[in-house]
Amino acid sequence: MIEPASAIVTLRDVGKTFERGTVALDGFNLEVRDGEFVSLLGPSGCGKSTALRVVAGLSEPSTGTVEWADGKHVRIGFVFQEPTLMPWADVAANVRLPLTIAHADEGKAHAAVAQALDRVGLSEFAGAYPRELSGGMKMRVSIARALVTEPRLLLMDEPFAALDEITRFKLNNDLLTLWRMLKRTVMFVTHSVFESVYLSQRIVVMTPRPGRVFTELTIDAPYPRDELFRTSVEYAVYCRMVSEALEKAMAGAAA
Amino acid sequence: MSERHWRIALPVLVLLLVMALWQTLVQIWVIPPYVLPSPALVLSTLVSDAPLLLQSLGVTLITTFLGFLLAAIGGVTLAVAFHQWRPVGYAFYPYAVALQVTPIVAVAPLLLIYLPQQLAVLACAWIVAFFPVLANTTLGLNSVDHNLIALFELYKASRAQILLNLKLPAALPQILAGLRIAGGLSLIGAVVAEIAAGSAGAGSGLAYRIAESGYRLNIPRMFAALLLLSLAGIAIFFLLSAITQRVLGRWHESATPRER
């Protein structure tokens, strides 16, 4: 295994208690390293989405700190569980949104949108409206929008959870291809053991209520990973290992 | 015939049947026109009184249109102000509700005392029409997808950008629904005020013609004026529906046919 790069962001002792008293995170520690594909794995309501939102700056931690390498925020792309598109705007305008907000130069924005759409294979659909697209295509638009600012860190909150299996597998493969091509850091939240093993270099297993890191597992299988990997013995062994860790995490929380 | 043809043919058929029945009964029982005029007489009155009635219709429509315009601008502006500055909303929203629930028929005579007549009529049309715009716009502004707001915040959008690029477009279906209601209501407001003003002895709108014809027992003209008012209301409704359809076009569920 190649020794991982330096941390791009570090969460130290992060706690998050919501107004109604729900403790989403408590003493949460995580280091996200430059260029890696790391997954947060845990059941619904274990605070993994909250951890992602804290990294994105969408949620203020109640306690603890979020430390960025060199002391400054890196550019972030965020993909929600739902495509979260503006239904009144066509695909190109949706992808362009981050640049529109930043008052980006017209020519540069146009080129960036074209490139982002090309990367997710939707160049021909620039003029289509969201309601005319399938669920998988909408998610691709969402990913293109996250990529359009060339972010160093891509945060994904169960992006494929609502898709059918065939579409999900296809998007898994395309995401891995993009990650290897663009060399970005991906922080991926999922409740699927199989998805996390297929995609990640590292899996952070969380305990539910309050969300803490139970253990970290390294998936030391080579890339490119494809459908052959999905049916390999190696994959099955990793899935069992991660499943067992998840079970222990849940049992520990219930005790 | 397709379903679309039936949807036009059936109401027209009902209209013709009722007219025929009405005409027949008036003739068989020899009902005098000052009790119930026949449809034919109403139509001929409409033609013979056309100059007078159309001029009055123009007056009422101008009031209605101005009331509607002010309601649209006022309703949306107030909703945005209430939404952007919460204390303003807390301070004034209850009074907007109070204005709405107080029957306009009761308010109109008061307004006629304090305002010049044309302004009072306009104020009535506005009072009745602005609330649905305010309420619907408020609902729309508050119903924006939270994740889309989070996305805008992630990219450091200003409050003005969130309003203009996200919240107002997202609220458009609700705003248009409010405007559709306001169109009909501003006509009602104008009519109510005209009738109140008419009893005070002034005015030249269509509703005033109805009141005036009533005093003179000119029942055919009452019916003719009523018919024109009704047609005006229908025209306003269809016009606003067409605008809604056009604006929401390709993106909103309500404006696109369901595929089977």
Image (cartoon, coloured by chain):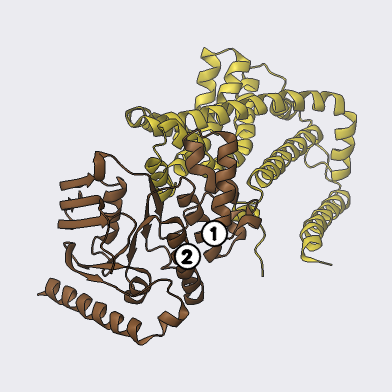
Closest to the observer: B232 or A42? A42
**Quadrant of residue B189 in the image?**
top right
Residue at 60%, 22% (x, y): give it: B122
Quarter holding the C terminus of chain A is: bottom left
Regarding residue A88, the answer to whether it shows in the image is no
Closest to the observer: A152 or B53? A152
From the image, tell me which residue sits under label 2.
Answer: A177
Task: Check the image and report above or below for B8 versus B111.
Answer: below
SS of the residue under disc 2:
helix
Query: Residue B40 — which label?
Result: none
- Indicate the amino acid at tag 1: Val
Regarding residue B248, the answer to whether it shows in the image is yes
In the shown orientation, is residue A24 left or right of residue B179?
A: left
Closest to the observer: A87 or B74? A87
Task: Calculate the distance from the C-alpha at mark 2 to the C-alpha at mark 1.
Answer: 10 Å
Q: What color does chain A have in the rendering? A: brown
Q: Output the chain of dot 2.
A: A
From the image, tell me which residue sits under label 1.
Answer: A120
Task: Check the image and report above or below for A90 versus B120.
Answer: below
Task: Check the image and report above or below for A50 versus B214.
Answer: below
Q: Give the farthest residue toward the left.
A: A255
The yellow-coloured chain is labelled: B
Residue at 49%, 55% (x, y): give it: A142
Location of residue B49 in the rendering, given as x and y in whole percent from the top left corner:
86, 28
Location of residue B67 in the rendering, given as x and y in whole percent from the top left corner:
61, 26
In the shown orientation, is residue B101 left or right of residue B9?
A: left
In the shown orientation, is residue A181 left or right of residue A195?
A: right
Location of residue B104 in the rendering, given as x and y in whole percent from the top left corner:
52, 30
Q: Give the farthest residue toward the front.
A: A2
Q: Earlier in the sequence, mark 2 or mark 1?
A: 1
Local crowd size for mark 2, using a 10 Å CA cut-off: few (<14), some (14–19), many (≥20)? some
- Indicate the amino acid at tag 2: Thr
